[in-house]
Every structure is written in structure tokens, then in C-alpha cells.
Amino acid sequence: MIRVLIERHIAESLEAAYETRSRKVLQQAVAAPGFISGETLVDRHDPNHRITLANWRSEADWDRWYHSANRRDLMTELIPMMDQDEKITVLSQSGS
């Protein structure tokens, strides 16, 4: 199993629109082969900073979702609402 840390920073006043569209991305990810679970957190000191931590069966499963036309289409709606590029970190347990 791997974990994927996704950090996004939302532009001012677009939080509600972002929430609606980001839920669509999560709903599609849940249906993707290899997706195990995920949660989205809000930075207590910066409410426009969102962190998603997703568990995937393998890096190959994550890569397949990340490069899919489905995700790319969904991200075209989210990207204009962010004031910084999305940052993604792929993590594994120590020793894996």
C-alpha cells in the first residue's frame, strides 16, 4: 500500500465552489481500481490550504488514476480555483 499526499491552495472566495467540485473528484477516485480510502483535511492556520491523504493499493494504481482522462477532465474544473500548483507526494512505510 502507498499513501498519496495532495496539497492544494484555494484562491480567496472560491472555497464553496472548490468543495463542490473536489467532491466530484473524490467520488471518481473512490471508484478507481486500487483506491482504498482517503480523507481531506483543512489547515487550521490557513483555511484555504487543503490536504488530501489517499491510500492506494500500489503506485501503479495511483499512476493509472493520476494520468487518466477522467481525472484530467475533473482537474480542468479545479485548477482555475487554485492560486498555487497542486503538490503531490507519494509515500510508503519505512522499509517498504
Image (cartoon, helix red, strand yellow):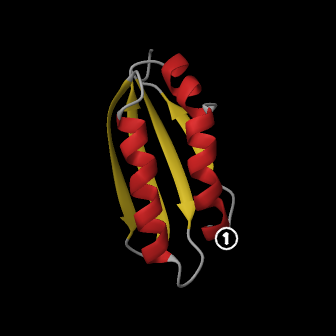
What's the amino acid at mark 1? Asp
Residue lying at the far bottom in this picture: please name it.
13
Q: Position of residue 67 (x, y in %)?
A: 64, 31
The residue lying toward the viewer, choosing from 28 and 56, is 28
* Percent x, y of residue 54: 40, 39
Residue sitting at x 49%, y 21%? 61
Look at the image and tell me whether residue 46 can be seen. no
Q: Is residue 23 above or below residue 84?
A: above
In the displayed structure image, the side of residue 58 where residue 68 appears, left or right: right
Horizontal side, residue 3 vs residue 86: left or right: left
Give the residue drawn at x 60%, y 31%.
Answer: 68
The N terminus appears in which quarter of the rendering? Answer: top left
**Residue drawn at 61 percent across, 69 percent down:** 81
Q: Looking at the picture, how far across and down is residue 9, in whole percent?
A: 57, 66
Q: Which of 37 and 95 is in front in this view?
A: 37
For the image, the number of numbered tags is 1
Looking at the image, residue 91 sits to the left or right of residue 37; the answer is: right
* Vertical side of 75 occupied by 83: above or below: below
Residue at x-position 60% and y-position 59%: 77
Asked if 62 appears above or below 9 in the picture, the reply is above
- Residue 55 visible in image: yes
* Image quadrant where residue 93 sits: top left
- The picture places residue 58, in percent across and down from the top left corner, at 46, 18
Q: Which residue is the site of mark 1?
A: 83
**Placement of 22 over or under 90, stated as above or below:** below
